[in-house]
Amino acid sequence: MQSLTPHRPAIAAVWIAAITSAFLGAAILYDASPGINWVIWVASAATALIVARTLSRLPIDRPVLILLAWATLLASAAAFTANEFKHVLVFVSVGMLLGLAVIVTGTPAWSSLSVALLPTVPFLAPLRVWMATAREAVTAPRAISSGPSQPVLRGLVLMVPLVVILVALLRNADPTFAWAWSGIANILPDWISGRAVFFLILLSLTVGANSIAARQSEARLPVAPSWRATLGMTEQRIVLIGVATVLWLFVILQVSYLFRPPPAAVGSGVTFAEYARQGFAELSVAVTLVGAVILLLEATRPKEPDAAGKLSLVNLELAALVALEILLLSAFRRVVLYEEAYGFTTDRLFAQAYMIGVALALVALGLEVWRGTISIAFGRRVAVIGLAIVTLLMFWNYDAWIINRNIDRAVQSGKFDLSYARKLSPDGAPTLIARRREIGSIVGDSLELSLKCRTAIGDRRWFEWNKAADAADSALQSIKTIPCPAGKRLSWSRHSDPIPK
């Protein structure tokens, strides 16, 4: 690792960009609802990193650019949803991506990165950032005292209090000065308390991140332990034969059920509901477990196995992977059957998304096994698959999709889970209100009364603009015919039911 002393413009940029970004974050993030404020701040923090690195005459590495761009993209999802779970997921994902960008600063090639970096992000990224902040805080006075910025700093120290005093003296002589003083008086208490603390926290993060971008010319990636265990070819063959036998026996039974479903089997005692509901979670865990076992066997395989023995292991692993894909298909089918019988929910949708992600990861693993070794690229591919699915879920209004599917099902069957519909986030409110009459007049009236008791999201400042919240407010304003009973009004953040069952 090589650490540089950046050029003076870069030192100034580290602090100016950090203070600007922290001030912006304290102004639009503190005590504010998620909206475009998130993407504004993340974009400003990402830009500050790029500027600091550019002024230090260091190359802007492709991995860092990709991570910063993806973090900004995910941050923008906060302005398109009012779902609190999505907001938490966006916050965690953006934090991980920004932290990873700090860790890999100075890495020129994406191919040198391993998925093993991910577990280190929550611990290593804050540690490095705060250490860099401490270094900058120690060296800043020397840079200021010996540089051309010293007169500017002294001038600012003398000017700021003098300007405040003059505005205070002249506020009674001019309405504009009175307005300015009123604004200062209203803002100061908030900044002296919690907002100032929030500003300092952001400043401690942005100064350190900008400092790393300006000073770190080469990567400082954590080094994985070199210890490596081995498991003999015979032991691996026994494990794979046992696993593949169990998996394919299960597959054969699933094929037989196409002709004779288990609920119809004599003496099985398995109802259709039990068959549809039970098993998909266990199947998903089993698939994940066997996939991990195959990875472990690959990692502990002798470095120079005999060609015939290695070929037999590869064939067994591929057979197990094909069976795992069929198991996932069976698990996915069970969820579909349960949705058709009992309706659509977010839990069932997330289970399906997880299965799709695991199925794609198994395809990637199969390609690695076919080539004869697990490369460092496999972990990155799996991470990208997971992040791509998360990104899709962030921008997809699945609450509205679930409501549409459940209403379509209710039109055919006459069954609609009203209590679950009331618990969905504001993202689904416009669809629920628009189609409430399709589920029957009695249920529709009850649903309209329940929605009427949900208070609007409320007025938002410009930086809190949120497309889903605006759509929910507009939809709520469209139902004016039925008043809400006294004492029954709820906010969207509460999931209790305001209407007695």
Image (tube, helix red, strand yellow):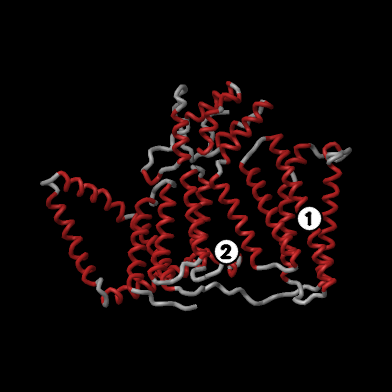
Q: Which residue occupies 64% across, 59% down?
A: 382
Name the spot of residue 290 as percent of width and height, x first.
75, 59
Mark 1 crowd level (few <14, some 14–19, many ≥20, 10 Å Cα): some
Q: At numbered mark 1, what does the secondary structure look like: helix, strand or loop?
A: helix
55 vs 145, nearest the viewer: 55
158 vs 421, nearest the viewer: 158
Q: At numbered mark 2, what does the secondary structure look like: helix, strand or loop?
A: helix
Numbered label attached to residue 322: 1
Q: Is residue 124 left or right of residue 189?
A: right
133 vs 359, nearest the viewer: 359
Query: Is residue 194 at least partly visible in the picture?
Result: no
C-alpha gap between disc 2 and disc 1:
28 Å
Q: Quadrant of the C terminus?
A: top right
Q: Quadrant of residue 413?
A: top right
Residue on which disc 2 sits = 118
57 lies above or below 39: below
Q: Which residue occupies 81% across, 39% down?
A: 270
Mark 2 crowd level (few <14, some 14–19, many ≥20, 10 Å Cα): some
Number of disc labels: 2
